[in-house]
Image (spheres, coloured by chain):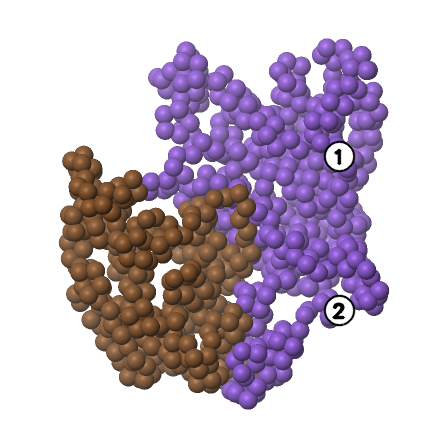
């Protein structure tokens, strides 16, 4: 039996909103989805008129929908933003080709400028070369760290004021759970903030923070947006995988769980006497880092010296040696060379 | 994973019925070990006991919240953890305890049989089993049926006034002097001493004992029917769990208040607490984790909830109970015999247990995370609403959050999905920057409701609840099935707020807590 849209009460509903359970027609859903993001942007004061805003574009559903909605809202509400797509080419043969094609198509469809930054150009190593050296088991450390910086470095080249990423409500709830389970208080405190980034770094924000992943897919589906599935091809870290599975089960029991967890995360507060790592900058590349060398520089150093394990474990004690280009002792070398697959 | 090893909640290697492991105890280096705590730490039976007892005393000792001579109510569920807790108190009161516990214990058991569909006979049987166990402790005890919530006063939902105490050391000194003055006879029973000091322990509690026992023996059928109706009106098992927890807390508070107990001991193990932490995060109760799971929960003002078992793992407790014959009573509960995906609480439990199997540091890591959390600063915020507390859980409200919040975003989503009070795509009233300022919202007139301070409208029942309790109430078919004391207090509060608004301009101290 056809159901009427609960918003306009005129047209036939075509979907049930995963977030609220309401049945909506296509137009009302588009409207609701876009307006909610607009509300997020305005209430959190994410942008100022005249800013140049980089959209981290992977070709995946989140960033594709983000680019589309930002373009729409920028026009509808005259934000006055200069939007630009920023894409990272990790150099994984076969894997990125399709997604980069998608990004290029998006660029044409939305008439947004696009900048592709490659690992080769930024680090001197492609992801394929890295995998060859470190093995499959550890490469996620590399792709996570390098990807974060790649976007920043690319954005810096373009003179961008802010970077937007496609993190959605599910991602954030999942991160709250994961940091909680891992006991990572510093990240737990930061992970629900909609804008991150300290002095010197380009601020990053998440306009889709309150958008459900399923609604993002629905939006892309009904808008016939072209996207490429870019789940990381390597297995995610164990805790994230568990947290994700748990979140899916929760959502099945109570759909509001995703927002409920974000609410929890936003209202947690940490005791004052808990030590927080001091944020500084990397002495080599200037990127924000709590150590004298940022994670990417340590990883790179490891790769360049043929000691891939350097960046994987905790080897802060060796940083001064790396900084002063001192050679490592034989024992230290042996410890860092072996990679277990 | 290179997580640090933790000592809080040792993972015990299960050995068969206390048989020797072929290792020597790492503590006394003499006796043969009967169990392993974590990797390698082997204990013999007597050293394990010493370790277990010491942990209990140390937990109480380092927190110093129980004053000598204070009446402490032990919440007993029949389960292993609260059984071990009662046993630890007995141990600490025994004549040969090295440093006797100096508080005055009583025990409370709440029969919740109705909520899981038990017959009258089954409940009677459980209660007489519980009675047998509790009688052996020699402590005064109360057995109360959950039905009694239908005769609670509305004042139960009001925060009490904390008793003024001198500092801990002064209190202890005073107590010692008094004891000496009474001509203390070496090892005389502490209860007798307290009776002499005018703390009329046995009689007063025996009287209230009778009172409660009589009501519990025959909870009026009408109350049983009401309770059944109330639980039937909850559409989800998740909400039933929360509802039960809420009602139970109110009843415990009521018994504690009427019988003069200023502390309640609750027996959650660290395993249990890790599960609660995770499920509470999932239930939107993140702001209250320190209250809901911390060592001392003082939200009620006059009665503090204390959790002295929070540093023991369930396995440790099970092992102790088996080795030292601590009997517990199995009582079916809401989650007995249901699928693991039936409620958020159940799901959290299964999840933590599985993760613990894969990563043995899970429970202790989660536990440590919670130790670093603080009751949210919402308490300290300015304005009158700062001191408003949730009608049901009495936590400081976590709903006075800004526009840019999950709470607000959810309201907007519900709003947009069902009304058409605004014109579509109307860029006219949208500067993109002036949203929600001065009552003018970028979303058109319809959004005004969200942008105006809520306090200006007469608060509805839901407005008096915290985020998490709203979720529970949303899952109820109607509010009518709730016990009268809840509805009365809601009305009462609503009247106070109305009144306050009328006279607001004449009040000099706007922050004064005068809402009740
Ligand atoms: Zn419609
Ligand atoms: Zn990866
Ligand atoms: Zn660096
Ligand atoms: Zn021993
Ligand atoms: Zn509440």
Q: Does residue B179 sit above or below A41 in this rendering?
A: above
Q: Quadrant of the C terminus of chain B?
A: bottom right
Q: Is residue A80 visible?
A: yes
Is A312 left, or right, of B315 in this rendering? Answer: left
Mark 1 residue's CB less than 8 Å from ligand 5? no
Residue bearing mark 2: B458
At 49% across and 83% down in the image, what residue appears?
A77
Is A195 left, or right, of A337 in this rendering? Answer: right
At 32% across and 81% down in the image, what residue appears?
A112
Q: Is residue A6 visible?
A: no
Q: Does residue B440 sit above or below B209 in this rendering?
A: below
Chain B is shown in which shade? purple
Is B435 left, or right, of A116 in this rendering? Answer: right
Q: Picture coordinates of residue B237 (x, y %)?
A: 57, 54
Q: Residue furthest front?
A: A324
- The reply to whether discs 1 and 2 touch (Cβ–Cβ < 8 Å) is no
Mark 2 residue's CB less than 8 Å from ligand 5? no
Residue B200 marker: none
Q: Chain of mark 1?
A: B
Chain A is shown in which shade? brown
Q: Does residue B133 sit above or below A274 in this rendering?
A: above
At 71% across and 12% down in the image, what residue appears?
B187
At 82% across and 62% down in the image, what residue appears?
B507
Specify which label sits upstream in the sequence, 1 or 2: 1
Q: Quadrant of the N terminus of chain B?
A: top left
Looking at the picture, do discs 1 and 2 lie on one chain? yes
Label 2: few (<14), some (14–19) or many (≥20) C-alpha neighbours in 10 Å: few
Residue bearing mark 1: B165
Q: Picture coordinates of residue B421 (x, y %)?
A: 61, 84
């Amino acid at each position: 039996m056809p159901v009427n849209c609960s918003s306009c009460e005129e047209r036939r509903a075509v979907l049930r909103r995963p977030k609220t359970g309401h049945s909506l027609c296509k137009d009302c859903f588009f409207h609701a989805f876009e307006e909610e993001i607009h509300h997020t942007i305005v209430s959190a004061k994410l942008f100022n008129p005249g800013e140049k805003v980089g959209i981290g574009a992977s070709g995946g559903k989140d960033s594709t929908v983000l680019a589309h909605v930002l373009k729409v809202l920028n026009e509808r509400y005259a934000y006055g933003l200069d939007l630009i797509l920023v894409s990272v080419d990790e150099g994984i043969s076969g894997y990125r080709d399709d997604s980069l094609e998608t990004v290029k198509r998006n660029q044409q469809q939305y008439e947004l400028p696009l900048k592709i930054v490659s690992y080769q150009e930024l680090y001197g190593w492609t992801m394929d070369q890295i995998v060859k050296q470190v093995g499959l088991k550890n490469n996620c450390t590399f792709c996570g760290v390098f990807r974060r910086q790649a976007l920043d470095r690319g954005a810096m080249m373009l003179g961008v004021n802010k970077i937007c990423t496609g993190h959605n409500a599910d991602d954030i709830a999942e991160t709250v759970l994961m940091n909680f389970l891992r006991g990572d208080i510093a990240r737990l405190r930061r992970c629900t903030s909609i804008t991150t980034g300290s002095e010197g770094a380009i601020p990053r924000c998440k306009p889709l923070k309150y958008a459900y992943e399923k609604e993002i897919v629905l939006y892309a589906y009904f808008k016939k947006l072209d996207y490429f599935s870019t789940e990381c091809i390597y297995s995610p870290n164990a805790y994230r995988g568990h947290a994700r599975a748990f979140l899916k089960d929760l959502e099945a029991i109570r759909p509001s769980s995703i927002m409920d967890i974000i609410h929890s995360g936003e209202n947690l507060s940490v005791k004052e006497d808990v030590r927080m790592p001091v944020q500084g900058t990397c002495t080599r590349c200037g990127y924000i880092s709590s150590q004298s060398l940022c994670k990417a520089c340590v990883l790179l150093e490891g790769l360049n010296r043929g000691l891939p394990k350097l960046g994987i474990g905790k080897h802060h004690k060796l940083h001064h040696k790396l900084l002063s280009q001192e050679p490592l002792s034989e024992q230290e070398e042996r410890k860092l060379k072996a990679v277990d697959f | 994973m290179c997580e640090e090893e933790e000592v809080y909640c040792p993972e015990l290697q299960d050995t068969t019925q206390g048989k020797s492991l072929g290792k020597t105890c790492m503590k006394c280096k003499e006796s043969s070990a009967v169990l392993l705590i974590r990797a390698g730490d082997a204990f013999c039976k007597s050293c394990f006991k010493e370790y277990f007892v010491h942990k209990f005393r140390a937990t109480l000792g380092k927190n110093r919240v129980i004053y000598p001579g204070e009446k402490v109510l032990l919440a007993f569920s029949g389960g292993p953890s609260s059984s071990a807790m009662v046993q630890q108190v007995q141990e600490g009161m025994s004549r040969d305890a090295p440093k006797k516990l100096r508080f005055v214990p009583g025990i409370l058991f709440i029969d919740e049989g109705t909520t899981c569909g038990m017959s009258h006979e089954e409940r009677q049987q459980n209660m007489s089993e519980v009675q047998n166990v509790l009688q052996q402790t020699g402590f005064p005890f109360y057995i109360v049926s959950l039905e009694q919530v239908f005769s609670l006063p509305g004042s139960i939902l009001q925060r009490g006034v904390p008793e003024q105490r001198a500092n801990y050391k002064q209190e202890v000194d005073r107590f010692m002097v008094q004891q000496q003055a009474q001509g203390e006879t070496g090892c005389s029973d502490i209860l007798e001493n307290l009776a002499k000091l005018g703390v009329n322990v046995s009689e007063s509690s025996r009287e209230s004992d009778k009172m409660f026992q009589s009501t519990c023996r025959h909870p009026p059928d009408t109350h049983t029917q009401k309770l059944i109706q109330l639980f039937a009106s909850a559409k989800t098992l998740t909400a039933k769990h929360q509802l039960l927890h809420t009602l139970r807390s109110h009843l415990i508070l009521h018994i504690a208040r009427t019988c003069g107990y200023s502390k309640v001991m609750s027996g959650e193990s660290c395993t249990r607490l890790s599960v609660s932490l995770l499920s509470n995060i999932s239930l939107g109760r993140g702001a209250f984790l320190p209250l809901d799971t911390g060592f001392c929960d003082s939200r009620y003002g006059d009665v503090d909830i204390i959790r002295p078992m929070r540093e023991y793992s369930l396995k440790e407790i099970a092992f102790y109970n088996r080795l030292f014959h601590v009997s517990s009573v199995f009582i079916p509960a809401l989650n007995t015999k249901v699928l693991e995906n039936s409620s958020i609480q159940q799901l959290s439990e299964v999840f933590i247990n599985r993760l613990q199997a894969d990563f043995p540091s899970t429970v202790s890591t989660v536990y440590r995370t919670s130790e670093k959390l603080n009751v949210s600063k919402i308490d300290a915020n300015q304005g009158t609403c700062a001191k408003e507390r949730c009608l049901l859980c009495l936590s400081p409200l976590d709903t006075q959050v800004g526009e840019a919040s999950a709470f607000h975003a959810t309201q907007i989503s519900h709003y947009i999905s069902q009304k058409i009070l605004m014109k579509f795509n109307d860029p006219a009233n949208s500067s993109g920057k002036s949203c929600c300022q001065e009552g003018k919202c970028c979303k058109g007139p319809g959004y005004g409701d969200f942008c105006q301070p809520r306090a200006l409208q007469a608060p509805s029942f839901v407005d008096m609840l915290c985020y998490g309790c709203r979720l529970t109430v949303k899952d109820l078919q109607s509010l009518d099935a709730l016990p009268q004391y809840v509805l009365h207090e809601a009305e009462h509060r609503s009247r106070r707020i109305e009144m306050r608004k009328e006279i607001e301009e004449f009040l000099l101290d706007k922050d004064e807590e005068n809402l009740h």
